[in-house]
Amino acid sequence: MKPAAFDYVVAHSAGEAVAALAGGDTQVLAGGQSLILELNYRAARPARLVDINRVPGFDHLGVTDAALRVGPLVRHSAFADLDHGPLGTLLGRVAHHIAHPPVRARGTMLGSLAYAHPAAEWPAVVTTLDGRLVLTGGAGARTVAAADFFTGPFGTVRRPDELLTEVRLALLPVGTGVGFAEHRRTHASFAQLAALAALTVRGGRVDEVRVGLVNAADRPVRARAAERVLLDRPLDPAAFAEAGQAAAAEDADPRPQPYAGTAYQRHAVAVLVRRALDAAHRDLAPTGG
Ligand SMILES: Cc1cc2nc3c(=O)[nH]c(=O)nc-3n(C[C@H](O)[C@H](O)[C@H](O)COP(=O)(O)OP(=O)(O)OC[C@H]3O[C@@H](n4cnc5c(N)ncnc54)[C@H](O)[C@@H]3O)c2cc1C
């Protein structure tokens, strides 16, 4: 199908984009990798699109005050070869799992967060890493913790007149191992389930730990029960399996999917969490953990 008719506005500054959104019934065109499909299927019929692709500076990606700052036009592919220590390594590994190269070349991290697809990787990553999201509207900017941003499938606290202008992710400490494990039905499909892990070890024990789940509930999951299993314990594959079981039993809240019942999904969560932790452990091995 073809999209229903809409007005098209090109913004040249954040202010112009916010002014267009204030007009009502307007959607932001970033990478277009989700929105254009919705327009073509007429699942979305906004009166107007505001294209932000020509706003100077919106592709900023850099570290200030020990936090990586990501602008609205940073494409998934920009994370492929990022420096910035363990955080850069984790983002690179995750980006590799998003769709395929043409989608990664256009789609943006902030577009993915705003869209909040339940099987998207970035929402779980920013939630697990305690990311901060900056929303800018006519009344100014506000900052929302990622844990408070997602409200359900395709649901966020973003108001229709607000532009997501930045995401901030604190750098991970040196001595952190990171891992990501995903299960998907075909090469370029969305994740059926995925898990990420970041383990910081001091004095031979797990000093900080973050575990997250993709598509294991109606919103991104920080797997706190799995983290409790690991905290202050020596690195030990038996503990990783135990953490996987805890994530499956206590952190995941799966909905039935067309190709996977909830029991299968809980089993897969246990396996993926263990694999993500194993990968994080391998990262630490060269330095002796
Ligand atoms: C074949 C295919 C496979 C895919 N596989 C995956 C996958 O495995 N994992 C995954 O995570 N994604 C996947 N995607 C989706 C892709 O990651 C999209 O890029 C992403 O969901 C949306 O980003 P975008 O920049 O393209 O946003 P757009 O499509 O431009 O916009 C999406 C929505 O977000 C809003 N929006 C965008 N930017 C902003 C902003 N800065 N402020 C406020 N609102 C905004 C738009 O108004 C729109 O409602 C896939 C897409 C395709 C076509």
Image (cartoon, rainbow, N blue to C red):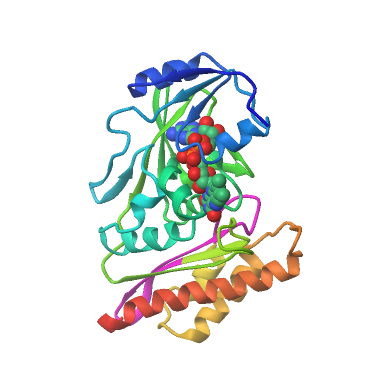
Q: Residue furthest front?
A: 1
Decide whether residue 79 is among the magenta residues. Answer: no
| Quarter occupied by the C terminus | bottom left
Location of residue 277 with respect to 256 vertically, above or below: below
**78 sits to left or right of 265:** left
Q: In this rendering, does residue 113 appear at all?
A: no
**241 sits to left or right of 278:** right
Q: Position of residue 174 (x, y in %)?
A: 26, 67
**155 sits to left or right of 108:** right
Decide whether residue 221 is among the magenta residues. Answer: yes
| Quarter occupied by the N terminus | top right
Q: Main secondary structure of the magenta part?
A: strand
Foreground residue, 74 or 206?
A: 74
Taking the spot 30% from the left edge, 49% from the top edge, the residue there is: 68
Q: Position of residue 238 (x, y in %)?
A: 52, 86
Q: Position of residue 88 (x, y in %)?
A: 32, 59
Taking the spot 65% from the left edge, 22% from the top edge, the residue there is: 4
Foreground residue, 206 or 74?
A: 74
Foreground residue, 156 or 17?
A: 17
Taking the spot 38% from the left edge, 51% from the top edge, the residue there is: 77
Location of residue 204 with respect to 147 vertically, above or below: below
Taking the spot 33% from the left edge, 75% from the top edge, the residue there is: 201
Q: In this rendering, does residue 237 appear at all?
A: yes
Magenta range = 197-222
Q: Position of residue 30 (x, y in %)?
A: 45, 34
